[in-house]
Image (cartoon, grey):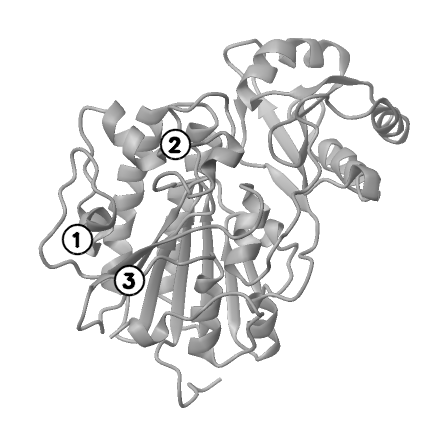
Amino acid sequence: MTKNGNERFRRIFTIVVDSWGFGSAPDSELYGDEGADTVGHIADSVDSLNLPNLQKLGTFNLKHIKHVDPVKNPQGYYLKLREHSNSKDTMTGHWEMMGLYMPEKFITFTDTGFPADLIAELEEKTGHKVIGNKASSGTEILDELGERHLKTGEMIVYTSADSVLQIAASEETFGLDELLRCCEIAREITMEPKWKVGRVIARPFVGSKAGEFIRTSNRHDLALKPIGRTVLNSLKDAGFDMISVGKINDIFVGEGVTEALHSTSSVHGMEQTIDIAKRDFHGLCFVNLVDFDAKWGHRRNPQGYAEELERFDEKLGVLMPLLKEDDLLMITADHGNDPTWTGSDHTRELVPLILYSPSFKGYGLLRTGDTFADIGATIADNFGVEMTEWGSSLLEYLI
């Protein structure tokens, strides 16, 4: 496909640093998150933080934090976005980026676990007894029930503050194929309106005793299809490339995706993105880096989160020199997950949007966005494809 007359950028790289919140959203008190600040509290919790590439883009002109100073002449534009949808989960955040508004939350089972009749149907159809059935962090429930699972073959089922049904099982004894089969059955069962959850997640692990169980990279998300067309559909229908890296393909159930790459870690996801930047493609590369959320935010580990940010910054330093004059880089997040906050849930926060192209002559702060959909609107505007009714393009400000 040739560049259209209004197209400024032939390739756009949108990287989601999963859960990288930039301070409480205006409505955070409705979610019990007033005062949450993922990036600020991480910086306050560690002795040092070295993020030179994010720094020079202007990231810390947008949000002043400990250890990393603002810069006088940043290389990028930057702004904060607030989520318009009534949620703080992964699917809603990503769907809103690409133009969908979710007025209602997905059904959650945080306080009670899943209903007895749902569990009974799951046991009957899979042939496995269920243990757990409560809200828990993945590491805690493995320490509690992992050894029992190894002895009995019972499936560990748990949830969180998100709309998820997670099944944990040993890759070595239960088997990955059997775990995926059971998750597919759970996905079918939870399509019923009274039980409809956003995602069913396979959580394979290895190890033989509490304290030593490790979740593997063979996680698999079985999500609901988006409730409507997104910018990804518009790009694909118009003949553009839409390359997904990480769990993007799972989140959108393949809708609008032309090529999908599975990542084993956030570092691997950045390495894949760097390889893609060396290729010639025309369209969008949409990346999710999940370790920030799954390994460090939910586990309430600010030191681990900080070190992951430094690894990301290092890879960012490899990616940026590969970008061409007609490339655009967008770095953002889908929600917060303050590792110093109570519980182990996501936090309702504003998120950053950092924009960079080697062609930029200007830089600086842009207005706060009222919806994550400004990201999708900017992408759609650039490629001249249909956008949903949500979001306003930033393209005219990028000079």
- Type of residue at label 1? Lys
Image quadrant in which the C terminus is located: bottom left
Task: Classify mark 1: residues with Cα within 10 Å, few (<14), some (14-19) or many (20+).
Answer: some
Q: Which residue is mark 2?
A: 36
- Type of residue at label 3? Leu
Extreme residue toward the left, this view: 72
- The label shown at residue 366 is 3
Query: Relative to 388, does residue 3 appear above or below in the rendering?
Result: below
Please tell me which of labels 2 and 3 falls first in the chain.
2
Query: Relative to 124, does residue 163 appear above or below in the rendering?
Result: below
Distance Cα–Cα, label 2 vs label 1: 25 Å
Looking at the picture, how far across and down is residue 396, in whole percent?
A: 33, 76
Looking at the picture, how far across and down is residue 163, in whole percent?
A: 66, 37
Q: Is residue 261 visible?
A: no
Q: Residue at x 58, y 70 (%)?
A: 388
Q: Check contact, mark 2 vs mark 1: CB within 8 A.
A: no
Q: Residue at x 60, y 65 (%)?
A: 230
Mark 3: secondary structure: loop
Query: Relative to 373, does residue 337 appear above or below in the rendering?
Result: above
Please tell me which of labels 1 and 3 falls first in the chain.
1
Extreme residue toward the bottom, this view: 5
Distance Cα–Cα, label 1 vs label 3: 17 Å
Q: Check contact, mark 1 vs mark 3: CB within 8 A.
A: no
Q: Which residue is mark 1?
A: 56
